[in-house]
Image (spheres, grey):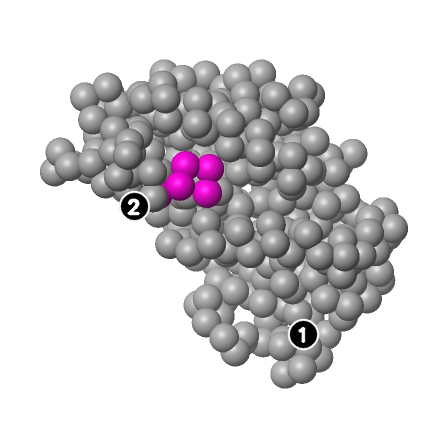
Amino acid sequence: MKKQGIIIHPHELTDQMIAILKKCENINVLGLHPPGGRAAAKNLDTLLELMKTPEFQNKLAQVRSLGIAIEYEMHALAWLLPRDLYGEHPEWFRRGTDGVRINDFNMCVSNDEALEYLRCRAAELARILKSDTGMYYFWADDVEETFCHCEKCSSLTPSDQAMIIYNTILEGIRRVEPEAKQCFLAYHETVVPPEQIRPAEGVFLEYAPMRTSTTIPINDENCEANSTFCSAIPGLLEWFGKDDAQILEYWMDNSMFSNWTKPPKKLTICADTIQSDIRFYREKGFEHITSFGCYLSDDYIELYGEPPVIEYDGCFV
C-alpha cells in the first residue's frame, strides 16, 4: 500500500475530525502522535490510558471502517527507558560533554543492559500500540545535542547512536511481531546518514524536513533553507534504500504554525507547493508520504470552521 496520511494528537480524534476524514478520498493512514518534549513519556502514558477506553476504541474502529489504517508515531525513548531508572542505573544514561552522566534525554547506546531493557519495553509498547500496517515509529528524544559522549559512544555520530537505538527497538518489536518494521527518523542531528552502523533488515527511512517555509517547493534552488533539506535526500536514500522510504512533512502542522501554543492560528495551505513536493518526493523514490496535522480539531473548528484537510487530501491526485 502506498501510504498517504495525516498525523494528529490522540485527543484530536473527535467526532468532527472523523466526519472530515470520511470526506477524504486519498488519505489512507492516520497517525496518532502524543506530543514530545520533556513531557513525552507522560503524554505517551495518557495515550495508553486512552487506549483502554471503549469510547476511544470505537473511534479507532470508525476510522478503520473508512479504509484508513491506524499507526502511532511518537518520541518514545523516555518511556522505553524511564528517566527514574537513573538512581539505580546511571550508567544506562548519556554522558554529557562535561563528563557527567545525566538522565534528561536519550541514552548510552554502548551499555548492553540498557539496550536489553530497551528491547523489552519496545516489545511491551508494540503489544499495546499495534500498528495496522506493521510499520512502527518509536522515535528517539526530540532534542538536539543530547547524544552520549562516554568513551565508547564518543566515536559514534548522533546518527550512528540513533541507528543503534532504532535497530534495538526493532529487535524488541519483532519479539511480538516478527515481520514488523521500524523507522529511522532523519530529523535534526540525524538528517545525515550514519557512518559506522548499518540499518538492520526491517529498518526503513523516515525523513522529516522541518524546513522554514512550506509555501516554497522543497526543490526550489532559490530557497537556501529548503535546498539544504533537499540536498540531504540522496545520501539518506543511498544508505537506507528506497524500500518503504517515507516523508514526514509539516504542510498541515498547525501546531508548528501556532508556535505550539493555543488557541490555534488559522491555517492556510499552499496546495500548489504540496503537489509539487509530492511529485518531487515520488520521483526521488519515497514510497509513503504523510504530514503532521495537529491543532486542527474541535477548538480550531469552533474558531475558524472546517480546517483544510479536504484540500490537503486533494493534493494526492
Q: What residue type is labelled 2?
A: Asp
Upstream in the sequence, badge 1 or badge 2?
Answer: 2
Mark 2 surroundings: few (<14), some (14-19) or many (≥20) residues within 10 A:
some
Res 24 visible: no
Note whether 111 is above or below 102 in the view shown.
above
Quadrant hosting residue 188: top left
Per the rendered image, the range of residues in magenta is 79-83
Please give the residue where the numbered disc 2 appears in the rendered image.
104
Q: Which residue is drawn at 76% across and 53% down?
A: 57
Residue at 21% across / 30% down in the picture? 149
Question: What numbered label is drawn on residue 298?
Answer: 1
Q: Which of 169 and 192 is in front in this view?
A: 169
Asked if the residue at tag 2 contacts the one at tag 1, i.e. Cβ–Cβ closer than 8 Å, the answer is no
Main SS of the magenta part reads: helix
Q: Which residue is more in the foreground, 64 or 92? A: 92
In the drawing, does residue 183 fall left or right of residue 102? Answer: right
Residue 136 percent across, percent down from the top left: 61, 35
What element does badge 2 sit on?
loop
Distance of label 1 from label 2 (alpha carbons):
34 Å
Say whether residue 100 is left or right of residue 269: left
| Numbered marks: total | 2
Q: The N terminus lies in which quarter of the figure?
A: top right
Which residue sits at x=24%, y=19%?
Answer: 152
Q: In this view, does 267 lie above or below 188?
A: below
- Based on the picture, tell me whether residue 107 belongs to the magenta stretch: no
